[in-house]
Amino acid sequence: MIEVSNLRRVYPGPLRTRRRSTAAPRVVVDDVTFSARAGQVTGFVGPNGAGKSSVMRLIAGLDQPTAGTVHVEGRPFAEHPAPMRALGVLIDAKAAHPGRTVRDHLRCLAALTGLTRADVDHALELVGLTAAVDRRVGALSLGMCQRLGLAGAVLGNPRTLLLDEPLNGLDPEGIHWMRQLMRDLAAQGRTVFVSSHLLTELALTADHLVVIAGGRVLADEPMTVFMQRADAGGIVVRSPEPHDLRDLLSGLLRTTVGADSSLSSPSTAHGTRDQPRSLTMLKEGAFEVRGLDAEVIGRAAARARVPLSELTSRRASLKETVMALTGPKTEG
């Protein structure tokens, strides 16, 4: 389990010189509080510069907080007698000597932390690198470097895992494998805390979500609860008789929600996104409707004998929902 409480990290401004005044201190983490619990995959997302990497470095003990506390399995990471049994860390997948072999890199980590060669063999098998043990680190692809970094993280069979962008460089098969591995580790009762800009993939993996922007936590809640924030995205309706469909939908909007509904063209579709009721012309005889239920549209079309070739409810993706919360510069 990871417990972050009132965490703050401030970098001082540059030193004063004769030609340049000292800049103001830079706050990169500002009163951050959240928990990542055992048995769950917790996603950690936000725009570039949001403070994600700073928070993860503070959790791993690589930086010291200006204020606040971080506990891993009930105590600061540095106070664990066997740190790699408590927390496995993947922050920089290429943090390995390029001249060492895969096996030698992991054996060095094991020797430095009191682990055994059996631990090395288990980690290699877990991440699928047993066939590459004699390859030089410098010759590995980015995807294989990610697997090697993950092997270092799981080397001590830790109760908690902290993974920063573990999907980078993986092909579709590797992404599927990583997703399943994180789910399996969580199912074993471990804490999996993962940062990723691949929000579509994270939506399939995470049980809980922490969203950060400007160094502050904007959301800390189960994924299902967070996705309830999503705009339903409207309903796409298509017909081989688009003029009749438009008249039908316009009439439904007027009689169902009042006369203030809007009719917009594709060029103004973005402007109607936040309006509760609208009718937007798409292309090829299709419209996007907001403020009506799909069943209401289907029944009305049947009564009016307007043929429908599509009647689809749209929901905002995790990416769209995070962007709506944090602003347009969100990753992913």
Image (cartoon, rainbow, N blue to C red):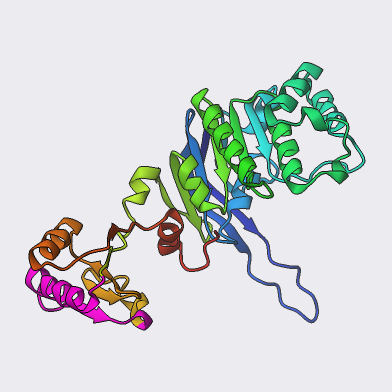
Name the side, left or right, on which 145 lies relative to 208. Answer: right
So how many labels did they put on this image?
0
Residue 146 found in image quarter: top right
Asked if residue 49 is among those painted magenta in the image, a careful observer would answer no
Q: Is residue 12 above or below residue 8?
A: below
- Location of residue 67 in the rendering, given as x and y in whole percent from the top left corner: 57, 47
Residue 170 in percent (x, y) is at 67, 46
x, y percent for residue 68 = 54, 44
Q: Is residue 6 left or right of residue 79?
A: left
Left or right of residue 8: residue 78:
right
- In the image shown, does 237 or 314 lie closer to the viewer? 237
Residue 198 visible in the shown view: yes
Residue at horizontal 11 percent and vertical 64 percent from the top: 300
Query: What is the magenta segment's predominant secondary structure?
Result: helix
* Relative to 187, residue 254 above or below: below
Name the residue: 35% across, 79% down: 266
Which image quadrant: the C terminus?
bottom right
Q: Which residues are magenta?
A: 240-267
Q: Position of residue 86 (x, y in %)?
A: 63, 26
Q: Nearer the viewer, residue 7 or 171?
A: 171
Relative to residue 317, is residue 163 drawn left or right?
A: right
Identify which residue, 9 or 227, lies in the foreground. Answer: 227
Task: Give the answer, above or below, for where 73 lies relative to 304.
Answer: above
Q: Does residue 16 sit above or below 30 in this rendering?
A: below
Can residue 5 be seen?
no
